[in-house]
């Protein structure tokens, strides 16, 4: 067949080249494949271990009942591969023993976490492992509880040794000669490079989804789930060492400054008429999730949002100017500020994680010393916010978390508040008297979506909005509180106890949502108040009053100890009691350096005086900022002293000092 010049040209131009390229491509692919096979065979030990670790990690996530993203899984495998490839740096004879040791170490991490999880429903961290001895006699229990299926993590070790001796060693030696040293080096270096790139991309993506995620640690498991098991442990070690190395070592003059401050504010303060008024009564404190003060007495379409709380406030003492003093630690800060009466930490993350090994002065500890049975409870898992560890550290003899409560009616994060209160009421009835019970509610949690059958309010236009959801949810929480009060009235605990109800922190309601119910803040924090009410039959002359003094979470412990007649002398609480204290000396300090007084509010976002604004607290009218300076410095001093207490773990040091002086 005649072929025209044109056709030949086209063939030359496209067809011939195409077939040549295809051939070349195929050849190249084949070459690459056989090179890869040689490379894998040349490191058959590492390759098989990687496969084994993929299975082990899958098993781990199954055993602890946790999901994991593909990218977290891949970067974990890359981390394992990078460690295993470190063996390349060793003399040939050492490489296999190194792999076995690395396999053992990496498997041990999986083993310990699985075991720890089966006992504590959490995964380990350096801090938790350091405290393991303090968490009771768990050594024996761990051995008896050991889920021996976990031993499966180590099964590959003897198997690998046998296979290596039997055939693998020869395969490795044979194939090593087929790939050049340079190629092997390039392959080995590409793994750590991939690890670095993969980790960076993965972490950036995770942080973009949840800003501040790495710092604001609220759960070990959540961090592990996001980062993958080995990255989690490395990050935990990094955080731990950063904190231990960066801890503030208080100088002797600082120590003296702290001692002096507490002496003046805790020991020198003379008692007034209400001291010891409620001596011997039980103490029941209910920390209400996300309950903000603006719901108190609020009516929507003629319906009260929190009728039971309002009623309790009419029966007891209402504190309409009680401020939320929490910071990064959210609920856990609410607990800490209220029970320990120190400020939240300036260090990113929760005190419950960062300072879990500290020794604290706290209300449950003091009450225990005064013969009280102490109990805490929360219907979510004890690992969240590290509560199981911290509540014990703070002095609670017994704590009940999701794992310890009976299953029952639930929505959202767990048991409904009503079911929770019901169980806790039974437990309180059975406690030796006097007791201190600290109950943390849960149902009113963001995003405040209560199931339709629990929605009782007719909200009109607010229905379906953020505010509408929040009101339904707060109304539910209030109903549950009403149920608790009813139970306490029935069994007589209402009149033999001091009952305190306060909100843990703001609900994060956006300003445009507040406007929907007619609230227009004139300055930030103006509505950052939480409800606070104290009822005690011993305060009969005061019950039914509205107490206008400005206050906050830190004031809870000094107030309750005062009512119980327990002197604050020798204790280390920074709050101010709500009674028998001059109002013009009241100062409620926030972590960011802002503060409120009885009449004014100084608000700064970055802790700098220069960027702060000063207002009349009630009206929101601006005031000349220079007038705020003196109190600003006082507030700064308090934050500094609190940080010293926390970061220098000073409680025991100060106690020793005071013992020596006696
Ligand atoms: C969970 C509950 C909620 O245990 O305390 O915590 P939060 O998100 O409010 O800090
Ligand atoms: Mn909370």
Image: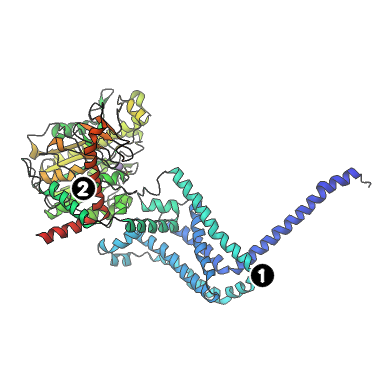
Asked if residue 152 shows in the view, the reply is: no
Occupied quadrant, residue 138 = bottom left
Q: Is residue 622 visible?
A: yes
**145 in relation to 395, above or below:** below
- x and y percentages locating residue 347 in the rendered image: 32, 49
Q: Secondary structure at mark 1?
A: loop
Residue under label 1: 178
- Residue depicted at x 25% and y 46%: 639
* Ligand 1 quarter of the rendering: top left
Which residue is farthest left? 273
Q: Quadrant of the C terminus?
A: bottom left
Looking at the picture, how far across and down is residue 45, in whole percent? 55, 69
Task: Give above or below for 194 relative to 540.
Answer: below
User: Looking at the image, is 489 positioned above or below residue 96?
Assistant: above
Left/right of residue 555 with respect to residue 5 in the rendered view: left
Q: Is residue 488 left or right of residue 186?
A: left
Which residue carries the number 2 mark?
A: 339
Total marks shown come to 2
Of the image marks 2 and 1, the number of the one nearer the N terminus = 1
Category of crowding for the residue at label 2, using alpha-carbon neighbours closer than 10 angstroms: few (below 14), some (14–19), many (at least 20)? many
- Nearer to us in this view, 317 or 635: 635
For the residue labelled by badge 2, is the local secondary structure a helix, a strand or a loop? helix
Q: Is residue 395 left or right of residue 351?
A: left
- Residue 126 percent coordinates (x, y): 35, 60
- 49, above or below 617, in the image: below
Residue 75, position as x, y percentages in the image: 50, 55
Name which quarter of the figure residue 526 lies in.
top left
């Amino acid at each position: 067949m005649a072929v025209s010049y044109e056709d030949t040209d086209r063939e030359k131009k496209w067809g011939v080249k195409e077939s040549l390229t295809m051939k070349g491509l195929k050849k190249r692919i084949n070459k690459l494949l056989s090179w890869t096979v040689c490379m894998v065979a040349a490191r058959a030990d590492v390759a098989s271990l990687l496969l084994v670790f993929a299975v082990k990690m899958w098993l781990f996530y199954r055993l602890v009942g946790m999901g994991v993203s593909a990218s977290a899984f891949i970067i974990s495998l890359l981390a394992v591969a990078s460690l295993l490839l470190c063996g390349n740096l060793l003399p040939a004879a050492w490489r296999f023993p190194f792999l076995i040791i690395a396999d053992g170490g990496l498997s041990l991490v999986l083993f310990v976490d699985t075991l720890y999880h089966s006992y504590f429903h959490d995964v380990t961290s350096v801090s938790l492992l350091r405290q393991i001895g303090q968490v009771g006699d768990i050594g024996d229990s761990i051995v008896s509880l050991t889920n021996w299926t976990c031993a499966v993590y180590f099964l590959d070790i003897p198997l690998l040794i046998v296979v290596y001796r039997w055939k693998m060693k020869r395969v490795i030696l044979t194939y090593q000669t087929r790939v050049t040293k340079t190629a092997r080096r390039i392959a080995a270096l590409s793994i750590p490079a991939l690890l670095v790139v993969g980790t960076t991309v993965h972490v950036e993506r995770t942080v973009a989804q949840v800003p501040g995620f790495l710092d604001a640690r609220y759960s070990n498991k959540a961090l592990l789930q996001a980062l993958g098991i080995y990255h989690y442990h490395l990050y935990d070690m990094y955080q731990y060492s950063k904190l231990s190395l960066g801890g503030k070592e208080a100088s002797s003059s600082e120590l003296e400054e702290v001692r002096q401050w507490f002496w003046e504010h805790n020991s020198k303060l003379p008692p007034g008429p209400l001291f010891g008024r409620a001596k011997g009564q039980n103490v029941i404190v209910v920390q209400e999730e996300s309950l903000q003060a603006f719901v108190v007495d609020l009516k929507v379409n003629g319906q009260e949002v929190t009728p039971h709380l309002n009623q309790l406030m009419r029966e007891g003492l209402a504190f309409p100017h009680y401020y939320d003093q929490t910071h990064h630690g959210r609920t856990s800060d609410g607990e800490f500020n209220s029970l320990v009466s120190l400020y939240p930490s300036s260090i990113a993350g929760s005190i419950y994680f960062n300072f879990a090994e500290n020794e604290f002065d706290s209300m449950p500890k003091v009450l225990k010393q005064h013969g009280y049975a102490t109990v805490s409870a929360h219907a979510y898992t004890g690992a969240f916010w590290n509560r199981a560890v911290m509540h014990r550290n703070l002095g609670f003899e017994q704590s009940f978390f999701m794992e310890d409560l009976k299953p029952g009616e639930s929505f959202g994060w767990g048991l409904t508040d009503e079911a929770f209160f019901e169980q806790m009421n039974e437990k309180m009835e059975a406690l030796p008297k006097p007791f201190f019970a600290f109950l943390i509610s849960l149902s009113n949690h963001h995003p405040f979506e209560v199931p339709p059958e629990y929605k009782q309010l007719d909200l009109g236009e607010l229905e379906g909005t953020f505010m509408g959801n929040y009101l339904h949810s707060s109304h539910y929480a209030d109903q549950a509180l009403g149920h608790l009060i009813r139970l306490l009235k029935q069994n007589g605990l209402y009149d033999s106890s001091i009952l305190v109800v306060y909100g843990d922190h703001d609900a994060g309601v956006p300003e445009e949502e507040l406007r929907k119910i007619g609230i227009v803040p004139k300055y930030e924090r103006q509505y950052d108040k939480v409800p606070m009410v104290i009822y005690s039959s011993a305060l009969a002359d005061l019950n039914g009053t509205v107490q206008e003094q400005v206050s906050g979470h830190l004031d809870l412990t000094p107030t309750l100890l005062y009512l119980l007649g327990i002197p604050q002398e020798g204790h280390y609480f920074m709050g101010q009691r709500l009674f028998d204290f001059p109002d013009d000396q009241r100062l409620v300090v926030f972590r960011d350096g802002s503060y409120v007084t009885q009449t004014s509010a100084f608000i700064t976002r970055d802790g700098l005086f220069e960027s702060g604004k000063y207002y009349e607290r009630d009206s929101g009218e601006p005031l000349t900022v220079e007038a705020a300076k003196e109190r600003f410095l006082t507030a700064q001093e308090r934050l500094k002293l609190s940080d010293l207490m926390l970061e220098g773990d000073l409680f025991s040091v100060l106690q020793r000092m005071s013992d020596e002086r006696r």
